[in-house]
């Protein structure tokens, strides 16, 4: 995935999150908006690495770490799940089909991990 595509996906995901949860602006301010987009770049970086190595477990390990970090910053697991669900909806058609299928599988497995 090229950088421009990654940035577009991250921006679209951030816009979708803040449209659905306007209270996040009050809670986290402008800094939260910036970090949400950066976080999505990181999610995509980790998905891309997992894909290149054909190792979904790399993304699941990242997800566990992410949950710990974000919970320490008072960001609930439900917001991570919401973010990953939005990525699942936004990814189709933006990357090669094989990569898309792998990434969506990883995101679904991560949601399952977070939901238990």
Image (tube, helix red, strand yellow):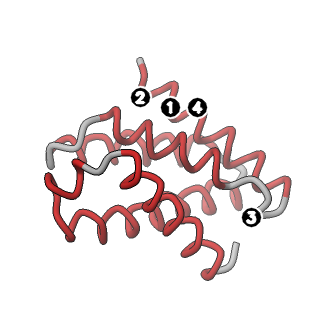
Mark 4, mark 3: which one is toward the viewer? 3
**Mark 1 falls on what kind of element?**
helix
Give coordinates of residue 37: x percent, y percent. 40, 67
Determine the residue positioned at 22% across, 44% down.
Answer: 75
Lower position in the chain sequence, tag 3 or tag 2 = 3
Give coordinates of residue 7: x percent, y percent. 54, 75
Judge the density around disc 2: few (<14), some (14-19), many (≥20) Cα neighbours within 10 Å: some
Determine the residue positioned at 59% across, 56% down.
Answer: 47
Identity of the residue furthest to the top in this view: 116
Q: Residue 114 carries which label?
A: 2
Q: Which mark is residue 94?
A: 3
Alpha carbon separation for disc pair 3 and 2: 25 Å
Identity of the residue furthest to the right in this view: 97
Lower position in the chain sequence, tag 2 or tag 4 = 4
Determine the residue positioned at 53% across, 64% down.
Answer: 12
Give coordinates of residue 11: x percent, y percent. 49, 69
**Which image quarter holds the C terminus?**
top left
Judge the density around disc 1: few (<14), some (14-19), many (≥20) Cα neighbours within 10 Å: many
Q: Which mark is residue 109?
A: 4
Residue 22 vs residue 100: left or right? Answer: left
């Amino acid at each position: 995935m090229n950088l421009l595509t990654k940035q577009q996906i991250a921006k679209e995901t951030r816009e979708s999150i803040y449209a659905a949860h306007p209270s996040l602006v009050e809670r986290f301010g402008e800094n939260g908006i910036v970090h949400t987009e950066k976080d999505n770049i990181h999610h995509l970086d980790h998905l891309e690495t997992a894909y290149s190595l054909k190792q979904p477990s790399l993304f699941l390990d990242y997800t566990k770490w992410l949950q710990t970090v974000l919970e320490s910053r008072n960001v609930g697991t439900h917001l991570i799940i919401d973010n990953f669900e939005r990525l699942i909806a936004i990814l189709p058609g933006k990357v090669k089909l094989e990569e898309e299928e792998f990434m969506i599988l990883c995101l679904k497995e991560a949601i399952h991990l977070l939901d238990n």
